[in-house]
Each structure stands twice: as C-alpha cells, then as structure tokens.
Amino acid sequence: MTDNVIKLNKNSILRLKIETDTGEDTGEYLEFDLEDIELPLRYQDLLEKDKKNKENLRNQLVIIEKRQDVKGKKLLTKNEEDKIKAINDFFKKQIDVYNMFLGENGVQKLLNGRKFGWTTLNEIDNIIQEQIVPYLDLSMKGITDKIRNKYTRPIKNNSEEIEIVK
C-alpha cells in the first residue's frame, strides 16, 4: 500500500535569506506569500502607522523642548530623560509595526543581535523599499491580471468582439 502525498505549491512564496555584512548565513529568513491579498494591506498599514509614530515622537519632543528644564534624578536633566523615554517608546512601537509586516520576530532577524536604533531603522526601511516592495508590486499586478483574466469574457455583437468585465 502506498501513502498518498499532497505536495504544496510554493511558487508564490518569496523567501529572503538573511546574511551578515560579510556574507555569512544567519540561518534566518523572511517569508512572504505574494498571493496573500492582505499583504499589500499590511504594507499600507505599516506606512500609515510608521508616519503616525514619527509624528507622535516629533510632537512629544517639541513639547519636551518647550518645557523648562530642571535637574534630573541622576546625571541627565529631566528633559533629557524624557526625550530618551520618548525615543525608547517610539522604537518599541516601530518594532511592533515592522513585525506586523515582516512577520514574527522579523526585526530581530534583520538586526541579528544588534540593538534597534536610528541607523537600523533606516536599514530596515531600505530593505523593505528595495528588496520587498518590488516583489509586492509585481504580485499585485499578477493578482489583478489573474482576476481580470478570470472574470473577463468576450461577447460577440454584430461580428465585433467586445470584452465585458464584471
């Protein structure tokens, strides 16, 4: 008796291997299902929440700057301590926003043990823009074409062929 086996088609899966700057394989990867119709929505959500987080941080820093500064508990002044807390909160929110799009622990995989900061924030933005978004754009075009091809039917009218899209 032979076992029945179901082989899954993974043609639409984008798997990005993560390497160090020296080319060493970290053993980690990011994976995206390019036929997932919610993937572009998650990307759009990332852009909106990213903009909102940055705006919120900017507002908090302006408020802190306008306050009168006093001596803090230790070495830093009260305003400097509050700025650091605001930036730390911003970083935590950004990690959650990126992980929503990149997948579970996506940021940690990309950081490969480094701390999250301004430099890594820019690196992750560049990775998304240069290495993921082009595939996302192609995927959306492919999904649109598949829908158009499936639901477009030719109709003949007085020896002319007319396409109707429902």
Image (cartoon, rainbow, N blue to C red):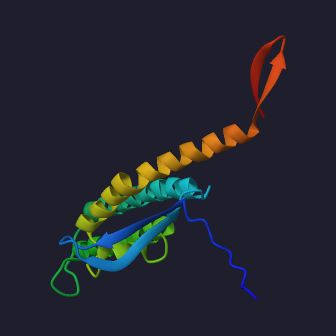
Q: Quadrant of residue 24?
A: bottom left
Instruction: Say if 13 sits above or below 111 in the image.
Output: above
- Front-most of residues 12 and 2: 2
Residue 81 shown left or right of residue 89 in the figure: left
Residue at 23%, 87% in the rendered image: 73
Side (left or right) of 74 relative to 140: left
Q: Is residue 92 visible?
A: no
Residue at image coords 69%, 38%: 149
In which quadrant of the rendered view does residue 6 lie? bottom right
Residue 116's x, y, as percent? 30, 74
For the view shown, which residue lies furthest in the left direction? 75
From the viewer's perspective, tell me whether residue 31 is left or right of residue 110: right
Q: Residue 25: give x, y in percent of width and height.
A: 28, 77
Judge by depth and name the residue closer to the eye, 101 or 149. Answer: 149
Q: Which x, y percent locates residue 82?
A: 30, 74
113 relative to 44 in the view: left or right: left
Q: Quadrant of the N terminus?
A: bottom right
